[in-house]
Image (spheres, rainbow, N blue to C red):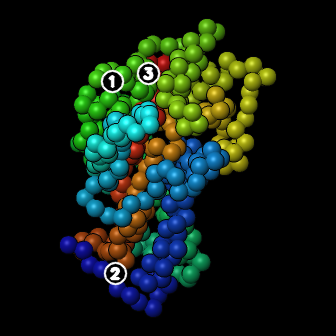
Amino acid sequence: MAQTIADTSSAFSRSGVAATLEFHRKTIRDNVSDRTALLSFLMGELGRSRRSNANFENSDGLPGVFMGGRDIRVPVQLELNETVGSYEGADTLDITHQDTDDYALFAIRQVSGSLNIVGRDQRGNKGESAIYSLLQAKIMALENSLRMNINEQIVGDGTGNGGKDIDGLAAVVGNATLAGLNPATFPAWQPGKAAAGDAIATRAGVDNTATNFDATNAGTDTMRAVYINVSEGSDRPDGIFMSPGIWSEYSAELTPQVRYQDVQAANLGFETLFFEGAGTFFDHDIPLARIFLLNSRHIAFMRDSEADFAWLDDGQRPTDQDVFVRNMIVEGNVVTDNRHMNGTLTAVS
């Protein structure tokens, strides 16, 4: 049972705090979205700039938000249109109905964090400037914690916290059933390409072979093979993510003549090097053995427009505690509309 905080004439009134926190909502979302390269790629400016840089329209690709619903419904194409083929003269054209499209139904995952101010701090900070400074410190702590937690979940497989975690890269870029679709039934629903009727990709987007980044260049060769397997012309991975240790080893392999910098990413504050035209980034939450090759047109962290770093209410004060509480929530999931355009290496050292 909680009691809504009373609106008073003090600087710490409910309306004043609500206005201040709402003003910072977009700042929190933007700072979480663009503080790490991985989050920026999946939900922020890095991903948007990648799509624009590839000469695709800004609207081409997965949207960042969706409008409510019980699931995130993502249209996917799992079968070819078999009516396409050559003909001559007055041949009868094939007009057989083609059921090529389906929907992937991704669960909506929920993340929350609370902003707490104890009554003693509230009463000890009088005046607008003191209150603003106190709120700034609390907002920064909440922002940093949201960023760290969401980034960690996005790398995982969705099984954390009893299966309540975000379905991260380990689940989305893989060969297991995802969003209600089984790759054994739909070979297109897996990284890479599969031969007709073959449940195992013949152009594998998931490589489980043990490989090393050393003087033999074996790691680079394996990464290049997966890159090719998940590319179709100009539609190819434009972000490659690995652990700091592997990124360091990859960087050491490069001679000064081939150390091409990604200026676009550098302008956003991210250190990166090019690989086959794709930027390579390190992320501290990615396990040492994993590398993810991602295509910004076909993977994103989508959020509910009404729960996109939204404050739940105007603030509450528990009946048995001298504490002011405000909750921020994020609802969404990592989704893909074309699973075979993303790839991964799983046994890197």
**Are the residues tagged 1 and 3 within 8 Å (C-beta)?**
no
| Residue wearing tag 2 | 5
Relative image position of residue 344 (x, y in whole percent): 45, 27
Q: Is residue 179 visible?
A: no
Which circle, 2 or 3, is nearer the viewer?
3
Q: Residue at x 29, y 38 (%)?
A: 178
Q: Disc 2 and disc 3: Cα gap in Å?
A: 60 Å
Q: Label 3 sits on what residue type?
A: Arg
| Residue wearing tag 3 | 203
Observer-nearest residue: 203 or 16?
203
Q: Which mark is residue 196?
A: 1
Relative image position of residue 205 (x, y in whole percent): 44, 25
Q: Secondary structure at mark 3?
A: strand
On screen, residue 38 versus residue 77, left or right, reads right
Tag count: 3
Relative image position of residue 162 (x, y in whole percent): 23, 42
